[in-house]
Image (tube, helix red, strand yellow):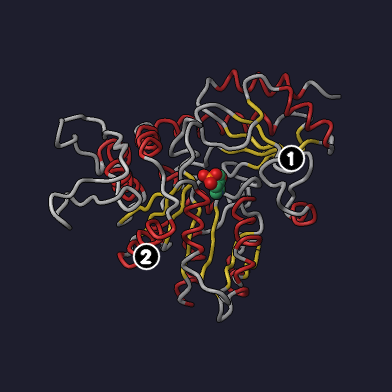
Amino acid sequence: MKFGTKAIHAGIEPDPSTGAIMTPIFQTSTYVQSAPGNHHGFEYARTQNPTRSVLEKNLAALENGLDAICFASGLAAMDAVMKTLAPGDEIISTNDLYGGSYRQMVRVYGKFGIQAKFVDMTKPVNVKKAISKKTKLIWIETPTNPMLNIVDIAAICDIAKEKGVMTCVDNTFASPYLQNPLDMGADIVLHSATKYIGGHSDVIHGCVVVKDQALADQFHFLQNATGAVPGPQDCFLILRGIKTLHLRVERACSNAAKVAQFLLSHPKVSSVNYPGFRTHPGHKVAKKQMRDFGAMVSFDLHANNMEAATKVLSGTKLFSLAESLGGVESLIGHPASMTHASIPKEERMKVGLTDSLIRLSIGIEDVEDLIADLDQALALFP
Ligand SMILES: *Cc1c(COP(=O)(O)O)cnc(C)c1O
C-alpha cells in the first residue's frame, strides 16, 4: 500500500458492533468482565483503549514499523524513551535540538545521572568521536529546529550499529510523509503528533514507532506503568488529521519553496534557511532521505536586531505569532524568546540562533497571500 492509502485505511476497520466507518471515541475508563480474566482484550483504559489501538496500528503503518505507542504529548513520548536508560548512561544529541527536548535531557534526566553530549551532527564523524563505552542512545533530529540543518540518518545509524548504540529520530519536522527513519536503520521514531500528524493545531499528542518486538513491549510497559496516555478524544482527532496528512504536507511544502524563494530575493533578508535550496549544506542529504524539503523556513535580517524582528513578528496579519508548527495555518515565531528560551544565549549564538532569527511554519493557504503578508511586514521597519 502506498502512503495516501495507508493514511486512510491502515489499521482502520468499521466498528464491529455498529458498522461505524469512523473509529468511535471509546470514552470509558474500564471494561466489564463476564468472569475474572474473561474479557474482550480490554481491562482498564490506561492499559488499552480501542481508539488508541487503532491509531497505534495506523501510525505503525505510516512509519513502516511493527508497532506504535501513543503518549499524551511529544515530550511524554520522549520521557518514555529516556526511561529506557539508566544512571551512568550517556546520550549524544544534536547541538540545535528542540528546546523542550534539551530541557528534558539536561534539566530532568541530568539529575538522574544521565549525561547528554551535544555535537554538530551534520558531520557524522562528530558522533563517532563522541561515542564512549557509556553511550546508550543517539538522539537525532532532522531537519533541525530552527536552523533547518540536515542530519544524515543512515550514516549516523550505521555508526550507532557498529557500536551497539540505540538510535532515536525525532521525525516531527519532516512528518512520516516526507521521511521514514526506520527504513534508514533507526531503532525508534518519535513524533510530536501535535504538529503535522494532527495538523490542525487542536490537540497535544505524541508517539514512538519501533520495528522490534522487544522494544515495543518495553514501550507498552512504560506507557502503562508510567501512565502518560492520551485520551480517546485526542486519539480520534489525530486519526482524523492523518487522513489528509499527505495532502496537507504536499501543499505546505510547495508553499514553503515559494516563500523561501521570495525571502531569498528580499533586500532586507540576510539569510534564509531552507533545505530545498541547492546551496543549503544539507541539500544532497535531504534529497536522499526526504520526499520533499518540508514546510519550515527560518530567516535572518540585515538589521541584526530585536526591534526589526519585533516589527515583522507583530506586523504579519495572516501569519499568527505563536509557538508550534505543522498546522493548516501559517505561523511565525521568534525562537530566541519562544521555543528556544530555555537554551542559554551562548549556546544559541554558537549555532546562529540570533535575536533577529524568525521562524515560519508554512500552512496550506494560497501562497500569494502568504508572500504578500510577509512583504508588507518586512516594509514596517527601515
Ligand atoms: C513540539 C515538538 C516536540 C514536543 O512535542 P509536544 O507534543 O509539544 O510535547 C518535540 N520535538 C519537536 C521537534 C517538536 O517540534
Q: CA distance from mark 2 to mark 1?
A: 40 Å
Q: Is residue 297 above or below residue 157?
A: above
Q: Give the structural element (helix, strand or loop) at label 2.
A: helix
- Per the rendering, the mark at residue 118 is none
Seen at 42% across and 54% down, the residue is 227
- Judged from this view, the residue extending furthest toward the bottom is 133
Instruction: Answer whether residue 246 is visible to the viewer in this image.
Output: no
- Label 2 crowd (10 A; few <14 / some 14-19 / many >=20): some
The residue that disc 2 covers is 218
The residue that disc 1 covers is 357
Q: Position of residue 258 (x, y in %)?
A: 58, 29
Which one is earlier in the sequence, the residue at label 2 or at label 1?
2
Question: Horizontally, is 34 left or right of 169 in the view?
Answer: left
Q: Position of residue 380 (x, y in %)?
A: 80, 21
Quadrant holding the C terminus: top right
Question: Horizontally, is 289 left or right of 4 in the view?
Answer: right
Asked if marks 2 and 1 touch (Cβ < 8 Å), the reply is no
Three-letter code, disc 1: Leu
Q: Is residue 371 above or below residue 188?
A: above
